Amino acid sequence: MQDRARPGELFSLDMIEKFIGFDTTSRSSNLPLIHFVRDYLAGLGVDSVLTYDGERQKANLLATIGPKDRPGVVLSGHTDIVPVDDQTWTSDPFRLARRDGKVFGRGVCDMKGFLAVATAFAPEFLKRDLKAPIHLAMSFDEEVGCLGVPLLIEDLVRRLPMPAACIVGEPSEMKVIRAHKGKIGGHVTVTGLPAHSGVAHQGVNAVEAAGEAIAFFKRLQRRLRDEGPHNADFEAPSYTTIQCCMVNGGTAVNIVAGHCTFDFDIRFLPGENPEDYVNECKAFAARHVEPEMQAVSPETGFAWEKVPGAAALNTAAGAEITRLAQKLSGTSGSTCVGFGTEAGHFQEAGMPTIICGPGSIDQAHKADEFIKLDQVARCESFLWRLLDEVSA
């Protein structure tokens, strides 16, 4: 059984370097990277299917190696990265640097490292007689709301048998993550009525109205903190969190604010419906804030806009996919985390799903983002074991 890369080889580093060389910041197109992977796989005789966004400036990639008439294993990750703006790097973030037993570059941890290792394994997958296919799945715009993965999953389940397993390679230090919180967000626009502050009764203060809703969310957060529900399996905090982190409004200190916006973020435990909390705040505003506003001007009030997020993941500790990931990673146990991924979307579609990938989430989104070389080696070992598992 070949369960690890040859000593000192780390044959996937060249592919990692190629992946890092593409600037796929979410505000930019990911097509140069997607086309590179498509062409690389085509050179091996493997076809790829691309699904595009509405402007055809971004695409997902799905490629299958092995028999297409049987349930297989999905190796999944997102191609987009967060910006490097206002960060001080000691090396070019889009040129892989190697020092002190680490490799540095934007996205090397989150999460091009895993995708590059999986891509580098394509020739190895092709050498074997696979009894189950390997699906390489690469999405766009995970960092801005998991916008691409629903299209990828829709295409996958329409064209292929439902996969038996999905492994999302988000950074976990090659340990098994079986559950994470989901996320939704909201953008709220409060319309008031401007007036001179000397005759404030003639106006409607949008900033103050927004403040009442924000304060309600804060009271709701305290209730969740103190009364739950709690899930002790999760790293702190063990409850759903609600944060209002962006507020903008008003024109001048002597003008009653006619406009205000605020944004909120809800990270919810599996099994909870975050819309319940949004609806609580909407009901509060409708009962206690808007009537006073609209008594002055009927055109005033709140407008609520949902911001896309991530589905929660909730795989059982004893599930077959959890045990498989532990076997492949050479670890025991599993954890539940607060950050979100695309994994919940695959699970919602009916695929047993787990998270296991190289690097630490502590390095994600930071200057001098890195993964250790031993993490690359462990990821390669993981895929060698997977290859043995699915080979005839």
Image (spheres, rainbow, N blue to C red):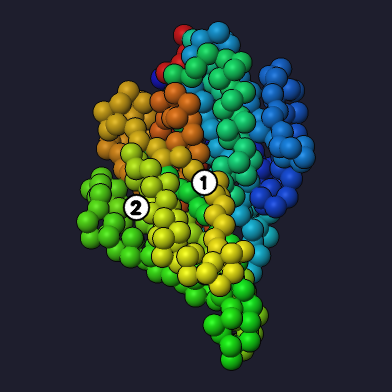
| Residue 89 position in % (x across, y down) | 62, 66
Structural distance between the alpha carbons of marks 2 and 1: 15 Å
Dots 2, 1 in contact, CB < 8 A: no
Looking at the picture, tell me which residue is in the foreground, 241 or 139. 241
Residue 109 appears left or right of 240: right
- Mark 1 — residue? 309
User: Could you tell me how many numbered marks the image carries?
Assistant: 2
Amino acid beneath label 2: Thr
Looking at the picture, tell me which residue is in the foreground, 283 or 124. 283
Res. 115 image quadrant: top right
| Residue 385 badge | none
Residue 391 appears left or right of 206: left
Q: Is residue 59 visible?
A: yes
Residue name at image x 30 percent, y 26 percent: 319
Which numbered disc flags the more N-terminal residue, 2 or 1?
2
Residue name at image x 55 percent, y 63 percent: 301
Looking at the picture, tell me which residue is in the foreground, 44 or 283. 283
Numbered disc 1: secondary structure = strand
Name above or below for residue 11 compared with residue 29.
above
* Residue count near mark 1 (Cα–Cα under 10 Å), binned few <14, some 14–19, many ≥20: many
Amino acid beneath label 1: Gly
| Residue 240 badge | 2
| Residue 72 position in % (x across, y down) | 49, 17
| Residue 342 position in % (x across, y down) | 50, 39
Q: Is residue 245 visible?
A: no
Residue name at image x 59 percent, y 69 percent: 297
Residue 138 appears left or right of 273: right
Res. 121 image quadrant: top right
